Image: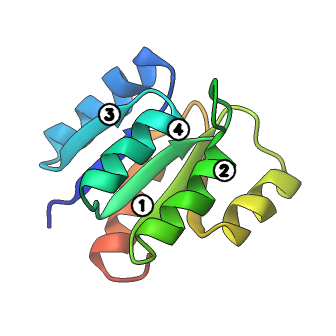
Amino acid sequence: MPFHILLVDDEEIVHQTIGDYLKDCGHQVEKATDGYQALEALEKRGYDVALVDVRMPGMDGLSLLSRAHGLHPEMTMVVITGHGDPDMEKKAREQGAVGFLIKPVGLRQLDDIMESLEDGNG
């Protein structure tokens, strides 16, 4: 089942690798390069899934998670970060994230998350 995904990351390489991979898998992917751009997109429409980096200029990913959850509580949110630790993962899950992936994200990890969402376990 294809998902409508919002990929939020300030690194272009993430959009090229993860974004292109998800598109190749049949998903519709829109990108945002910071939290404010993501909020604009979320105010205009809903998404099935948001993949959100934590450390970005301006609004960080944890703040975005909280605000996004308020706008679209049904949306599945997954954190992708290069700076993960158990405390950050706990905070992300408290803000509504169902997944926590450490960069560089393995495509198998991404597949596992997407498969769990397709199975309704996300």
Quadrant position of the N terminus in the picture: bottom left
SS assignment at label 3:
strand
> Where residue 31 is drawn, which disc sits there?
3
Distance CA(mark 3)–CA(mark 4): 11 Å
Which one is closest to the eye, mark 3 or mark 1? Answer: 3
Quickly name the residue at label 1.
112
Distance CA(mark 1)–CA(mark 4): 25 Å
Identify whether 88 is placed above or below 16.
below
Quickly name the residue at label 2.
63
Quadrant position of the C terminus in the picture: bottom left
Q: Earlier in the sequence, mark 1 or mark 2?
A: 2
Q: Earlier in the sequence, mark 3 or mark 1?
A: 3
Q: Position of residue 82 (x, y in %)?
A: 68, 32
Q: Position of residue 81 (x, y in %)?
A: 64, 38
User: Does residue 17 appear to the left or right of 83 in the view shown?
Assistant: left
Quickly name the residue at label 4.
35
Looking at the rendered structure, the kind of residue marked 4 is Gly
Identify whether 3 is placed above or below 23.
below
Of residue 93 and residue 34, the one placed in the foreground of this image is 34
Residue at horizontal 32 percent and vertical 21 percent from the top? 16
Distance CA(mark 1)–CA(mark 2): 26 Å
Which one is closest to the eye, mark 1 or mark 2? Answer: 2
User: Alpha-carbon neighbours of circle 3 within 10 Å: few (<14), some, or many (≥20)?
Assistant: some
Residue 107 shows in the view: no
